[in-house]
Image (spheres, grey):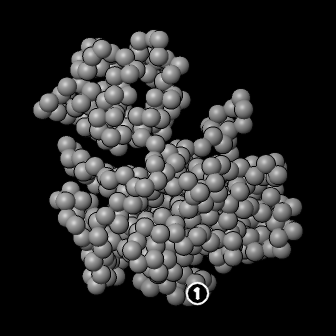
Amino acid sequence: MDQFGALLYNSNEEVLSMSPPISLMCHMMLAFLKERLPLDMHAILLSDLLIRLNTDQYKFINPNITAVVPPLKTLSEKGLIVFIPSENPHSSWVVHDKESILKKVNGALFADPVLKKSTGLASTTGIISTAVLKKTFPDYNCDMITKFMVHFEIGQVVDLSQIKTNMAPEGSTSSDLCPLLFIPALVSIDRPSSATVPNNSFCWSVSVKSDQFFTPRFHHVLLHRLPLEFALPDSQTTSQPLNRLCDVWSRGIKWLSETGVTTIVEMSESFQAISLTMSSPNKTSSKYLELSHSVREVIKKARQEFCPYLEVLEVVSCPPECSSDHSIDTRVELSRLRKAILEKETHIVDVSGKKSVAIDEWKKMEPHLSSLVEAFTPTGQVLPPVEETSAHQPLLSEMIGQVVKQFQDEAPTLPKLLCFSDKNVNIVQQIGVNYSKFGILLLNDNNGSIVKALEKQYCQNAEDIVIAIFGKWIEGMGEKPVAWSTLVATLQKINM
């Protein structure tokens, strides 16, 4: 018996060398996985493992799921195996030879570009369909290899519900698609030489304190959400529907929109700041403002989702073309800029604390400035009117006046307004930036009680509030007569 004990004690040095020591059940489980399973089997479903345990001639281990899972989890925590749990416990995976699988995964991801293209792993965005893994790793179950890569953070599953894009082929739904996987190793490491924008670009950034950092998960989420939502599909590579006309590298992404807007989103080397840089031939274009707002919202949403605990500071740069000092960009905190404008200050100090900048210089950034500052403006407060620049900028009322000519002989109805809103989303969004003043004027809502009630009802969703204001107006509340010309006249009153 002593000899048997000594043999048992020395039979698995891997387990015994762990500190603190683990149970005999763990020892026997690891021995079974290493010695009783075929050499070419690197992973096994938990349901199949239970069957093999039940038919094993020694039957030392109870083939019951409640008895088997605890030692498997312990072995996984010690790094001896990889236990990948599932919602259905029987569908969990037990990877007992992780080294062999890691070698094949690394070999495929860092293979020659020609070989990666033949297997479908070549991607301009680092995003692939998990169906590609079936072709790349024919010896392994697709579900297992996907979960294995996610477990080791080699890739992450793309949550399409968080992205405004239509990836489904015509006649199908997003539920018909294979899951998508973003693999950082598939994108370039170095920033491409083409990833540059003119010096007079608009720049907005979010930074954290010196002792805080953005997480890699947050960064990787942005690297796959932004191209899928904003970059144009690559029509030249129909065999790769996930490819996009953009440059993606380890720390950023650049793309060009249909309207000619160049956009770069990039993480700093220290992972303490992320910047949005944009340039367009027409900086007052509604499409330009809409894109700027949408990209910032994606960044903010991802930060709230993955880094909610970080204390962030939003900074905006005044391009040299808008500054009296044309040699350098001037950077200020967005919260300070908002406060200075609302309190009608004449100057503001930049982030360095060494330079004072005239507020009038920032007003040259209109309409970007209103779009940025309004997001931080408390309900009921509006920005003071901005003086017109020498170059004529079309007012929103002029834009709507041109659009609604088709309705000039008809009385507005809610269906017509909804149709108008669907076809002119950019106009409705611009009204939404200043919906409080717009609603108070259109509805003769002197104390703002109607607008406040709508804010509460629609959870301060600007677009829904604007539509509700339209509805109240058509019902006969407010400015009369109810006509398209009344709408234009109201916008003219607030210089929109």
Horizontal and vertical percent position of residue 276: 49, 65
Image quadrant where residue 451 sits: top left
Horizontal and vertical percent position of residue 448: 16, 33
Name the residue that disc number 1 marks. 13
Q: What residue type is labelled 1?
A: Glu
Q: In which quarter of the image is the N terminus?
A: bottom right
* Left or right placement of residue 110 versus residue 34 in this view: right
* Left or right placement of residue 294 versus residue 438 in this view: right
User: Count of labels shown?
Assistant: 1
* Left or right placement of residue 11 versus residue 78 in this view: right
Residue 460 shows in the view: yes
Q: In which quarter of the image is the C terminus?
A: top left
Question: Residue 250 versus residue 451: which sits nearer the camera?
Answer: 451
Question: Residue 130 versus residue 477: which sits nearer the camera?
Answer: 477
Q: Element at badge 1?
A: helix
Image quadrant where residue 63 sits: bottom right
**In this rendering, is residue 489 above or below 302?**
above
Horizontal and vertical percent position of residue 262: 60, 60
**In this rendering, is residue 75 above or below 455?**
below
Question: Residue 132 versus residue 198: which sits nearer the camera?
Answer: 198
- Taking the spot 24% from the left edge, 59% from the top edge, the residue there is 341
- The single residue placed furthest to the left in the displayed view is 447
Image quadrant where residue 108 sits: bottom right
Horizontal and vertical percent position of residue 463: 38, 35
